Structure formats: C-alpha cells, structure tokens
Image: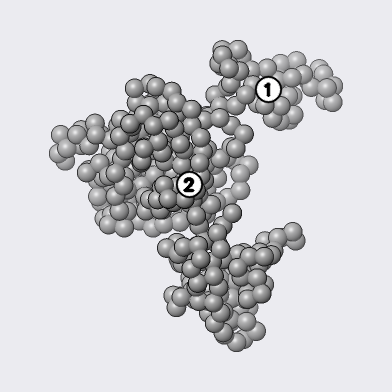
Amino acid sequence: MDEERVIRTIKRVMPAVVSIVISKHLEDLEREMPHELYSFLPGEHHRAIKKPRRFKIPESLIDSNGMVSIGGGSGFSVAPGLILTNKHVVTDSNASYTVILDDGTKLPAEVVSRDPINDVAILRIPDRNLPAVPMGDARKLQLGQTVIAIGNALGIFKNTVSLGIVSGLSRSISAKAEPNDPVQEMRGLIQTDAGVNIGNSGGPLVDLEGRAIGVNAAIISSAQGIGFAIPINAAHRDVEDILKYGRIERPFLGVRYVMIDEKLGQKMGLPVAHGALVISEGAHEHAVTPGGPAKGKVKEGDIILEIDGARLEVTRPIQDALENKNVGDAVSLLILRGGETFTTEIKLAERI
C-alpha cells in the first residue's frame, strides 16, 4: 500500500467532509418525552401516574437559543451549497440541523430533499466555497479494491478516517434507524471492512483517487468489520435533480407488492415463482394507489412478470426496474391475471 497516496487522498477529501448536529427546542423535547420514562426519574414512583413531573434536561446541555443537541451524523459537499448525507440522519422534520465545517465553522442547514426510495438526503447551507468531493462510479468497483471511509465517528470523534477494502457488492439488508422505526429494505449496497461507526452515517466512502463511490449508511451491530454504503450513483441522480428542479424527482408506478420466489409461490399456490404480486399490506392500505398511474390497468392479485421486457425477480424488484426511468416515461408491463397474460402500458407519475 502506498501510504503517501492514501495520505494525499485524505488531505484532499477531508475539507469537504462535515459534521451534522441535530437539535430540538427544549420545550418540544420535554413535551415529546414518553410518559413511560417518568417512572425511572428520581422520586417519580411516589407521584401519581396521572400527574408526572416535567422531565428536566440539565442546563449544561441547553444552548443560548434554548436548543438541545440530540444526535449527529456526517455529510460531505457535492456541489456549491449542497451537502449529501443519509436520509435517516435528517429524518425528523421537527428538528433543526447545523453543519460544522472542517475548520469548526457552524452553519444553519436546510433539508431540501429526502429521497423517497434510497437512504440519502440533501442539505443546503450558505455557500462558503466549500470544496466538493467528486463523484465516481460505483458500478466499476471491484472486490478487494481499497476504500477510505471518513465521518464523525460515534458523534464525538470528528473526521475519523478508516481504511479498508470492498468486501462485497450488491448486498441487501433490512435495517432500522431507530428501534421503533419501520424496517427498511436496503438493496444494492457496498459492503466494506473499513471501520464505520454510529455517527459515520452520511460520510463519504472514497476510492484512492478521492472520488466518492458510496455514502456510509449502516453497520451490523452484532458483527465486527462489516459496514455498508449506498452506491454513489443513486445520490448522483438526486444531486442532478436538485440542481435542475430544486427537488428530487422519482417515477411512481402506484402499486404495493411483494416479490415472489419459489418458497412464496408454493406457500400461496401461485402459478409462477417470480414476479411482483400486487397486494395490500393491511385493511387501510390500497394495493393500487387511488388516482395513481396504475389505476384501472392493474388490479390486486395481479402478478407483474416483466417491465419493458425485463423479468422481475427477488434480486430485481420493481424499484430496481424503475431506477433509470424518469417521470413521464411510459413503461410496458407483462401481467398475469386469472391464468392469462397480457401487456399494458403505464405512464409514470412523480412520487410525492
């Protein structure tokens, strides 16, 4: 390993990496304190359950504006005034976000877009001529390729650097940002053994040329040396959308579905072992979105076998089939209904 090359790359990328501080107003935070936790406060077991005392946050944690820091993450500059990070870092619409630059400068940050599909988001800060990390192409990654992860490790150690290799490609995991959050299926991830910790989320995974090839996103808490990053290609499109439209545009088919494999096909007595079964997730959910582009053309119980002639499988769901499509594009669906197959064309709408 050429140590000088690694050091040069880190020095080039580091000024573009930022820390993201998540804050909430004191009164909002106290109001959101779950009542179940009151019983753990000193002396609270002596009080009536219906009249819990107000949870008090130590004054040392409250800034001059009455804000309390409740978490943090990482991000990096990708264009003038635009910071790329994970969606789960900035998921709270009621929180305030502050970006801390490499030199310690603190800047207010506005969430301009959260990707509806991928775990990426974009913040806007006052343009300070911050250098940008050039975006590479994750499709060209090779197993064993050297990568560098940079981020705000554990929310404490600013701009921590770790070196590793690409351990796996196109990984899929189910993850939660918080214990009570719904499970999110994350697909097409880059697996790396470069040290990634809580707080590194949103930081760049770069190659030895200093090009971002991923956004650090997740770790396996029960294992060591296993981290995941979202391929930069998904974020590249988001940045282009922001610069062009001021928001992220994503095509929307308007169906809820589960992907069929051999096991599910046998369990449900389906005539095929691949495709997407259109089905609602509960009594209050619609299998086909009312007023959506698929309304009147797709029905609950249909099996979508192909999109534009490409077969749908567990490893290639509808989400992947639409990844390179744009709002307004027409797609051809091969559908199995009642033992018969037919083709229908649907014009994609914008996901709201």
Amino acid carrying label 2: it is Gly
Which of the pair 95/204 is nearer the observer?
95
Q: Which residue corresponds to mark 2?
A: 246
Q: Image quadrant of residue 267?
A: bottom right
Which of the pair 300/265 is nearer the observer?
300
Residue at 74% across, 29% down? 35
> Which secondary structure, mark 2?
loop
Say which quadrant the N terminus sits in: top left
- Residue 18, given in percent of the width and then of the height, sits at 39, 31
Q: Which residue corresponds to mark 1?
A: 27
Q: How crowded is mark 1: few (under 14 residues within 10 Å), some or many (20 or more)?
A: few
Q: From this view, report whether residue 179 is shown above or below residue 145.
A: above
Q: Image quadrant of residue 211?
A: top left
Residue at 68% across, 22% down? 27
Say which quadrant the C terminus sits in: bottom right
Residue at 31% across, 40% down? 133
